[in-house]
Structures are given as C-alpha cells and as structure tokens.
Image (cartoon, grey):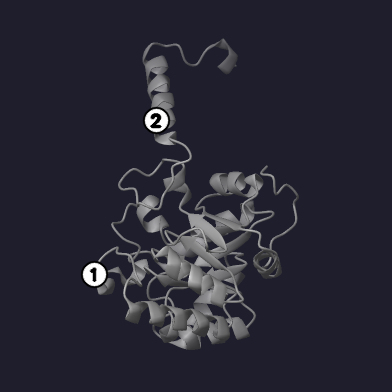
Amino acid sequence: MSKQGKINKITTFSIQKMKTEGEKISMLTAYDYSTAVLVDEAGVDLILVGDSLGMVILGYDSTLPVTMEDMIHHTKTVSRAAKRAMVIGDMPFMSYQISVEEALRNAGRFMKEAGAHGVKLEGGREVAEAVMKITSSGIPLMGHLGLTPQSVHQLGGYKVQGKDDKTAKRMIEDARILEEAGAFSIVLECVPAPLAGEISRSLTIPTIGIGAGVECDGQVLVVNDMLGIFEKFTPKFVKKYAKLNIDIRAAIGQYIDEVKDSKFPGEEHSF
C-alpha cells in the first residue's frame, strides 16, 4: 500500500478536505475486478471507470461507440473491488445530452445498478442544467473540461484546448458554472498548465489534471497507459511507470515454449 496507508473510505468530503489542506489527489482508471483490486489496495483516492475502455479494452478507435450497458457492466466489476477508493462512472456519449431527465435516469443507473459512488460527464455551460438536476438528486458529479473526447470531431481532433484568450476565458467561466451547478470536482484535460493553475486557484472544488500541469489539485491517468500495456498510441502527458507489455509477452512466450517442449505442466502442477 502507498504511503497514504490507512483504509478510510474516500468520499466527496475527503476529496474536498484534500484540496483545502493542500494534499494532492490521486486518480486512475480501472475497468475490471483484478486491476481495480490492485489499484485500490495501492491506495489511490479515486477510480474512474472511464469510457476510455472503448479504446483500451473494447478496441474501438474512439470513446463514441461505448454504451450505457458497457459502462454499467464494467463499473459493477470495479465497484465490487474497491474498498477504499471512490468509484466514478463515466457517462458515455448520448447518455446525458438528449434531455435532463435522461441524464438523471442514466446517472441513477450508475449508482443503483453499478454501485458507483458518483458520475462524470463532459461539458460546461451546455450541461449545467443536467449537472444541477443530478447533484440536487444526491448524486456526486465530476465535471470534465478542456479536451472532451466525446466531442473530438467538433473540436477538430485531440488537441490542446484553451490556448487563446477567448477559449481560455470561456473555460474559466465554464468551470465556475459547473461549481455553482454542484459538481464536486472537475477534470481538466489537455489544458495549458498556466490556465489550469488559474482555474484551480479560482475554484473552491478540486481540479484533476490530465495533461494540464502540476498546479491541478490532483492527477489522473489511464491505468493501461501508465503500466505500459496499451501500445496503440501514447499521449504526451502519459508517464509510463512500468513496461508490462514486455513482461507479459515474455511470460506468454515462455509458457508457449514450455508447453511445446512438454516442460509444463511439471509434477508439481499435476495431480
């Protein structure tokens, strides 16, 4: 377990307290029970069951094909694993954009069916009404600004957002709108570090950065990226803390060789 150590269940109160006391918040994705157990036992504060599973687990080219059923299925498995971390279910494309009522219904499914402790959705002022409805119904909600992958076609690709004064000002305003609507935290993705720092200082709720510099109140990475498992592409903001792709290939190669050479199973593996 990390130096955080103790098994105290993380809540929105815990996350807010970390911001107030200047303690950085750690967040990682997880999509299955075994990985979630390891992430949770290591002491991460927040586990995001991200719609990134569309790319790193399901093999799509984007997050857009991911369905509510996909998200409910994977969030259920992670929720069963997490004893300490707060589990956040990522609301997939078109699960909250149709209407406020649809947004609330789907957010409720994450809590009721999947055992999540909160939800995340993308967007600023355009989703404020849905955020207000969801949070006023007792569902913790995390916002997401900057590069919002569900809007990748509208944004013109996976690009840094907020580089000019106009879009930077709008992002600052959107962050305040989300806070006022009841969000307990906001992910800032692919945002220039100075802008992310300004937003973080201007809010009372925590920011979680991914490609947004060190001044955010916390950080998040896709676990398959930081462990070196997913190889299709590596964003600039990813630091690889392990190269498990090499170890996994080597282990499987050794297994194949031992099967071919009748070295496995040995007497100790036989009945």
Other residues around mark 1 within 10 Å, as few (<14) / some (14–19) / many (≥20): few
SS for tag 2? Answer: helix
Please determine whether, in this image, residue 117 is positioned above or below residue 177: above
Q: Amino acid at mark 2?
A: Ile
Q: Earlier in the sequence, mark 1 or mark 2?
A: 1
In the picture, residue 190 is in which quadrant?
bottom left
Q: Quadrant of residue 165?
A: bottom left
Residue 24 in picture, x, y percent from top left: 61, 58
Residue at image x 51%, y 52%? 30
Q: Quadrant of residue 167?
A: bottom left
In this picture, residue 9 sits left or right of residue 135: right
User: Residue visible at 50% across and 74% down?
Assistant: 199
Residue 196, image x, y percentages: 46, 68
Q: Nearer the viewer, residue 242 or 173?
A: 173
Is 70 drawn above or below residue 139 in the view shown?
Answer: above
In the drawing, what numbered circle is on residue 246?
A: 2
Q: Quadrant of the C terminus?
A: top right
Residue 45 lies, in percent from the top left, at: 63, 56
Numbered tag placed on residue 168 in the rendering: none
Tag 1 residue:
156
Residue type at mark 1 is: Gly
Q: Is 154 or 37 nearer to us in this picture? A: 154
Q: Nearer the viewer, residue 250 or 26?
A: 26
Task: Check whether the beta carbons of the residues at disc 1 and disc 2 lie within 8 A of each other.
Answer: no
Can residue 105 be seen in the rendering of this structure? yes
Q: How many marks?
A: 2
State the separation of the CA atoms marked 1 and 2. Answer: 34 Å
Q: Residue at x 28, y 72 (%)?
A: 155
Tell me the quadrant of the picture where the N terminus can be found.
top right
Q: What percent of the width, then of the height, locates residue 163?
A: 33, 71
Q: Secondary structure at mark 1?
A: loop
Q: Comparing marks 1 and 2, which lies closer to the viewer?
A: 1
